[in-house]
Amino acid sequence: MNKPAILLAFANEREEGQRYLRNLPFEMNRLRAALEKAEDRGLCELIILPNTTLDTLISTFQRDRYRNRIAIFHYGGHAGSYELLLEESEGNTSSAHGEGLVPFLAGQKSLQLVFLNGCYSAQQAQALISHGLPAVIGTVQAVDDKMATGLSADFYAGLAEGMPLSQAWEEAVFKAKAQEGEQDLNRYYAQSRSVKLEGAWSQFPWEAYYRPGAEAIR
């Protein structure tokens, strides 16, 4: 079984409060729907972790069935500047720190793309690139939950149709901008639209980082 695997991992707050990501289940379902088309054609194997703990994430990469086969790792959920906020079996969240997670992911021989679809993940994205990952997508600020769902779904739909990585990403971004416009970039961020744009807020909050040649990955 040599076909590449795609790992989709999600972590959320268990109780519906201020930090509960209401659109995260929709993101999981939309990504599954987009990528199952490629799976049905025998192009990949899809792995979905809906309530990801650090143990389940690491053990999935280490399983003999998936070892050196996972080509794409997508994370949807809360993140910090150098951590992913994963779940615990007790229902709480805990930090998976970049000091260990970044070199672990960088050491996965088959990994071509990491998409950290959580807030403030650009530092981890840049660290992964510096550790040798071919392509990583991260965010420069706290992003809107609904925007994160639509953008990632459109991106993977393009990949599932055989587009090169950079084209699939650019067209997903173009669609988001066509729907929302750039006059009020606040709508892309998880902040009040009344806040004045300045600094990082004057740019599209998702950023794709590539090593040379990675843009053409399919």
Image: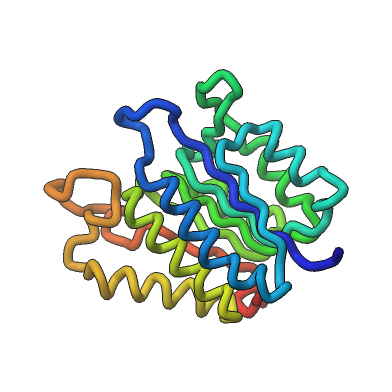
Q: Is residue 122 left or right of residue 15?
A: right
Residue 49 percent location from the top left of the image: 61, 44
Q: Residue at x 66, y 68 (%)?
A: 39
Residue 122 screen position, x and y as percent: 49, 51
Colour scheme = rainbow
Drawn side of residue 18 relative to residue 116, left or right? left
Dividing the picture into quadrants, the one containing residue 111 is bottom right
Quarter of the image with the C terminus is bottom right
Q: Residue at x 71, y 73 (%)?
A: 43
Q: Nearer the viewer, residue 216 or 22?
A: 22
Residue 44 spot, x, y in % from top left: 71, 67
Quarter of the rendering containing residue 209: bottom right
Q: Residue furthest top?
A: 90
Q: How many marks?
A: 0
**In the current view of this chain or complex, which residue is farthest to the left?**
194
Quadrant placement of the N terminus: bottom right
Residue drawn where x is 25% and y is 71% of the image: 179
Q: Position of residue 50 (x, y in %)?
A: 56, 42
- Near-viewer residue (178 or 101): 178
> Residue at the spot x=37%, y=34% of the render?
20
Q: Is residue 64 above or below residue 40?
A: above
211 with respect to 151 (left or right): right
